[in-house]
Image: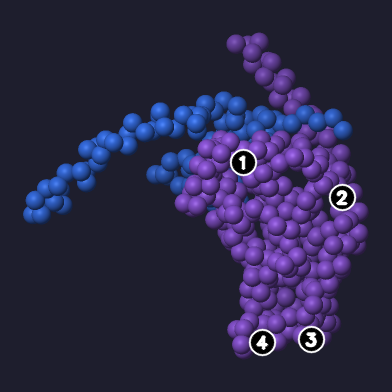
Amino acid sequence: MERKEWPLWEVFIRSRNGLDHKHCGSVHAPDAKMALQMARDVYTRRLEGVSIWVVKASDIVASDPDAKPELFDPAEDKIYRHPTFYQLPDEVNHM
Amino acid sequence: MYTQSLSIPDGDAKGPRKVENPDYLAEFNAKIDAGSFIEPKDWMPEAYRKTLVRQISQHAHSEIVGMLPEGNWITRAPSLKRKAILLAKVQDEGGHGLYLYAAAETLGVSRDELTEALLSGKAKYSSIFNYPTLNWADIGVIGWLVDGAAIMNQIPLCKCSYGPYARAMVRVCKEESFHQRQGYDLLLHMMRGTDEQRAMVQDAVDRWWFPSIMMFGPHDKDSVHTDSARWGIKRISNDDLRQKFVDATVKQAEVLGVGLPDPDLKWNEARGHYDFGVIDWDEFWNVVGGHGQCNVDRLAARNKAWEDGAWVREAAIAHAEKMDKRERQVA
């Protein structure tokens, strides 16, 4: 049995207007048009979406999980970027 | 649907266990202990990856094969309403299979490899689908008991440690409730019908009860020891899940007005649970081993579907390649 796998597409769905598209899974499809139709059938059988993006999985550039410290640790000690860092008098603390 | 507490070995070649880097392993175990999720590109022990590929793919195969016993009744549904409901349910099962294949593929295995394992008979799927659907009430009983058992099995998986599997299971569980309720509703209608219809329901319950409680897998004392619990893949034991299912189902059978075919089924005040009779594990292992009533038919149907669809897959990819080439020539 000769096999030629259809490429993989990542599927992103906007569940309703006002919200971001959110990754929800993937489908195999020969081209973009079919990928959209398959994503519709697989991921929106119950009104889960009003808009679909499909992106070829091979086109996604992802950060390396092993590089997590270099990428994300620098933010860890910058607590002054958060509003809770600043202690204000009680009378105005709801600012 | 549908995992039975599966992860029954697929007959993989046994090799020496890989020695893992102790630092990575410690970090991995710490993550598991902290209850955080493992994501696709994170480091994970080889045995964890293998266990997940096996379990998720067996689960996916079960969904796909699970379309067959019910698909059998689509053209014979007694009304347009029931036909539409059954079509939607069978389509869901196909969808569940696809969510799960996609989750398995994040572990570095290809869809083709997974398909090949199913078609060649190497991979297992839930033994429940090797029983035939003999009358229309079987469709109701599958929804009520088989999907009901599956829900018990699947809810804990929504919190399993592997992110893509857990997320797929959240989606599956949301849809599964429809499956169980439509089945019970179908049976309620038949029970309000004629004596003949009631007899059909009882006949279906008699045949499906024990296979359904077998779906939870062997007793804990007979289960092959795995690291699934340690790794947060399996969170509740086979026997505990089975007991929960039996306890929940007795009342439902009463409301429906059917008997459950087990003379030893009775409330045990001391335990606070229902006791039930001895399960015929020889039957279970016989079906798992390929000798159930429908094993041969099910695999033949999947192989035929795959082969009959080959020209469509090839034509679609040829068309996509042609359009690509044209676009590049214009550009």
Based on the displayed image, in which of its 4 quarters is residue B203 positioned?
bottom right
Is residue B159 shown above or below A22?
below
Q: Which secondary structure lies at badge 3?
A: loop
Distance of label 1 from label 4 (alpha carbons)? 44 Å
Q: Tell me the residue that label 3 is attached to.
A: B263
Mark 2 chain: B
Pointer 4: what residue?
A: B267
Q: How crowded is mark 4: few (under 14 residues within 10 Å), some or many (20 or more)?
A: some
Which is in the foreground here, disc 1 or disc 4? 1
Kindly identify the amino acid type of the residue bearing the numbered disc 2: Leu
Cα distance between the residues tagged 4 and 2: 40 Å
Query: What distance separates the C-alpha of mark 1 from that of mark 2?
Result: 33 Å
Query: Which residue corresponds to the image point at 68% horizontal and 30% vertical from the top-left?
Result: A7
Label located before the other in sequence (2 or 3): 3
* Left or right of B203, for residue B26: left
Q: Which residue is drawn at 9% across and 51% down?
A: A89
